[in-house]
């Protein structure tokens, strides 16, 4: 069984308006997920350096997937993927999405605990029209991959509807994990952060990570899911 998580870290700026990357890493330690998709993981202006310093990540149980796009950055348009240190990264790519404002997604294919898995991390547009275009673009990118493998897509979808908008696009061919309300961290009212899996993945459990640290580290709470690939269920 693998645990995946998605976390909009808001450039490590907490609800107390303090930038504290170490606090974000403490929340990741609490989560103890095997794979984490991060949003807003790079600073927005200037050199757009990583909001989580490499030396702090090096002290954790994780390593970042290296997309090699921008020196000093952690990902692509703020999207990044962290995996357990023992994970083997088979392939990775930055996905260029149709956009009104700077948006993108990242994809990694990994092998961990004997399981090969495709991960997509994304942060979709505030505009409903552009969100749907971006969702369809992500789905098309996954469909165009040369290999078929269990797939997990996750991130901040910026979708307030529980079943409409881009949720309808993803639900047409994938399952949505029942994670719950993750925004705002102090008083969660919206399910903006989602985990979406292919039909060959079974969602064993899912939820929102709540703790005193998570309530202050970002304006989003992280969401998580415990997954089993189809072949593991068969055995």
Image (spheres, rainbow, N blue to C red):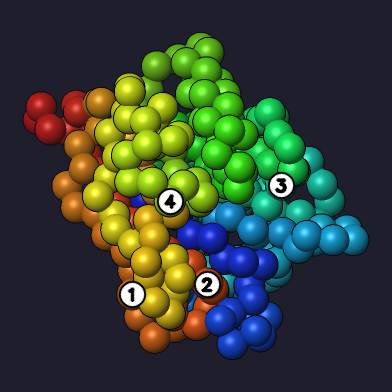
Earlier-in-chain disc, 4 versus 1: 4
Secondary structure at numbered mark 1:
loop
Quadrant placement of the C terminus: top left
Per the image, label 3 sits on a secondary structure element best described as loop
> Which residue is tagged 3?
77
List the residue tagged with mark 2: 219
CA separation in Å, label 4 and label 1: 20 Å
For the residues marked 2 and 3, what is the alpha-carbon distance in whole angstroms? Answer: 19 Å
Seen in the picture, residue 152 relative to 205 is either above or below; the reply is: above
Above or below residue 81? Residue 213 is below
Residue farthest to the right? 46
Few, some or many residues within 10 Å of mark 4 (<14, 14–19, 20+): some
Residue depth check, mark 2 versus mark 3: number of the one nearer the observer: 2
Q: Which comes before the other along the chain, label 2 or label 3?
A: 3
In this figure, which residue is indicated by the disc labeled 4?
A: 160
* Residue topped by disc 1: 210
Side of 129 where 53 appears, left or right: right
Q: Horizontal and vertical percent for residue 80?
A: 61, 50
Badge 2 element: loop
Q: What residue is drawn where x is 33% and y is 35%?
A: 197
Disc 4/disc 3 C-alpha distance (Å): 22 Å
Number of callouts: 4
Q: Residues within 10 Å of mark 1 (few under 14, many from 20)?
A: some
Disc with the residue nearer the chain's start (1 vs 3):
3
Q: Percent x, y for residue 181?
A: 34, 62
Q: Look at the picture and state if 87 lies above or below 138.
A: below
Please tell me whether mark 4 sits on a helix, a strand or a loop.
Answer: loop
Q: Is residue 114 visible?
A: no
């Amino acid at each position: 069984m693998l645990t995946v998580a998605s976390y909009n870290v808001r450039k490590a700026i907490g609800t107390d308006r303090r930038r504290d990357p170490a606090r974000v890493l403490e929340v990741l330690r609490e989560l103890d997920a095997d794979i984490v998709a991060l949003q807003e993981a790079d600073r927005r202006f200037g050199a757009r350096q990583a909001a989580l310093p490499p030396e702090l990540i090096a002290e954790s149980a994780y390593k970042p997937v290296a997309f090699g796009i921008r020196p000093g950055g952690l990902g692509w348009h703020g999207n990044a993927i962290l995996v357990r240190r023992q994970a083997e990264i088979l392939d990775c790519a930055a996905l260029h999405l149709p956009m009104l404002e700077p948006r993108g997604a990242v994809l990694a294919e990994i092998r961990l605990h004997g399981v090969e898995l495709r991960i997509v991390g994304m942060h979709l547009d505030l505009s409903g029209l552009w969100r749907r275009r971006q969702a369809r673009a992500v789905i098309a990118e996954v469909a165009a991959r040369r290999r078929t493998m269990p797939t997990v897509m996750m991130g901040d979808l910026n979708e307030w509807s529980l079943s409409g908008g881009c949720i309808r696009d993803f639900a047409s061919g994938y399952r949505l994990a029942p994670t719950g309300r993750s925004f705002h961290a102090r008083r969660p009212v919206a399910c903006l952060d989602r985990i979406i899996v292919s039909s060959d993945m079974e969602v064993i459990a899912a939820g929102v990570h709540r703790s005193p640290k998570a309530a202050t580290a970002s304006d989003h709470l992280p969401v998580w899911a415990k997954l089993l690939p189809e072949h593991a269920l068969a055995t």
